Every structure is written in C-alpha cells, then in structure tokens.
Image (cartoon, rainbow, N blue to C red):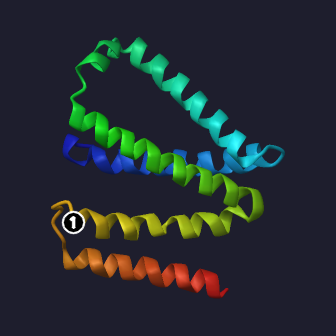
Amino acid sequence: MGDEHIWIFLGVTSAFFAALVGIFNKLGVAHLDSTLAVMIYTFLTFLYLLLITIFNKKIYLLWHIDSQSLCYLFLSGLCGACSWLAYFFALKIAPISRISIIDRLTMIFLVLLSIGFGERFYWKTLIDLLIIMIGIIFIFLN
C-alpha cells in the first residue's frame, strides 16, 4: 500500500477499534453508573496515551502547545465528554446496534459543519450523505 493511501488503512483501523470500543463499553457499563463508566474509560485512555507519549519521547512537546491549539483541544475535549456521557447513558438503556446507527449521524453533522470551516464540498458527498440518511431511516423503520 502506497503512502498516499495509508489514510484509508488508518480509517478502517480506526473504525474497527471504535467498534470494539462500543462492544467493550456496552459490557463495561452494564453494572456501573454511566457517568462513572465514562470517567474510568477516559482516565484509562489518558494513562495509555500518556505512556505512549513518554515511550515515544514526545512529552517535551507538551510545553510547546500554542494557545489557539490549546483552546481548540479544550473545546474538543468538552464536546467529546458531552458525546461520551450521552453515548454511555444510551448504552445503559438501549441496544448497541441501535445506538451505533444513530451515532453514524456524526458523519452528516461533520460534513455539514466542515463546510463552514472551509472544507471543499463535493456533490458526490451530498449523495453519500443522502444514502447514509436513507439507510438510517430504513433501519429505524424496521
């Protein structure tokens, strides 16, 4: 696989591990409060990534983060926490197969929001989003 297509492999890898995250989260939240489960998940994720950063000798970069990047990462963390809290609460009360379908609305929101941030819009993307939306509707009519 050439370097120009590595993003496809990484995207599929991300999707696979995200699916495993969903399964393990569903099992892990079964006997816990959903907020506590999110806190444990986030803490363990932090520790794991801290160890990777230290192992890769990149921890020194922490002192070189510019204020704009820090602000965006803060907002991302805040939005991520809100997303995870809602997701874990949903896992507690509904089947993961239904939750994961609704969660795919992320793609629609992301593409629409990215246009406002200067991403280029392609009509093919609109067709892709319509297909995703139709799929979500069909699943919920089932």
Q: Which quadrant holds residue 131?
A: bottom left
- Against 79, is 141 above or below? below
Q: Is residue 106 left or right of residue 87?
A: left
- Residue drawn 42% across and 51% down? 12
Tell me where residue 93 appears, x and y as whole percent.
76, 62
Determine whether the residue tagged by mark 1 lies in a helix, strand or loop. Answer: loop
Which residue position is annotated with label 1? 116
Q: Residue at x 40, y 19 (%)?
A: 53
- Which image quarter holds the C terminus? bottom right
Q: Is residue 129 above or below residue 51?
A: below
Q: Is residue 104 above or below residue 32?
A: below
Task: Indicate the quadrant where residue 127 lies.
Answer: bottom left
Q: Residues within 10 Å of mark 1 (few under 14, many from 20)?
A: few
| Between 55 and 90, the one nearer to me in the picture | 90
Using the image as rendered, state which of residue 90 and residue 133 is in the foreground. Answer: 90
Q: Amino acid at mark 1?
A: Gly
46 to the left or right of 38: left
Q: Position of residue 139 (x, y in %)?
A: 60, 81
- Residue 132 pos. (x, y %): 44, 76
Q: Nearer the viewer, residue 87 or 48?
A: 87
Q: Is 66 on the left or on the right of 37, as rendered?
A: left
For this orientation, the residue located farthest to the right is 31
Image quadrant where one finds the N terminus:
top left
Residue 64 percent coordinates (x, y)? 23, 20
**Rendered residue at 41%/13% (across/down):** 54
The count of marks equals 1
Quarter location, residue 61: top left
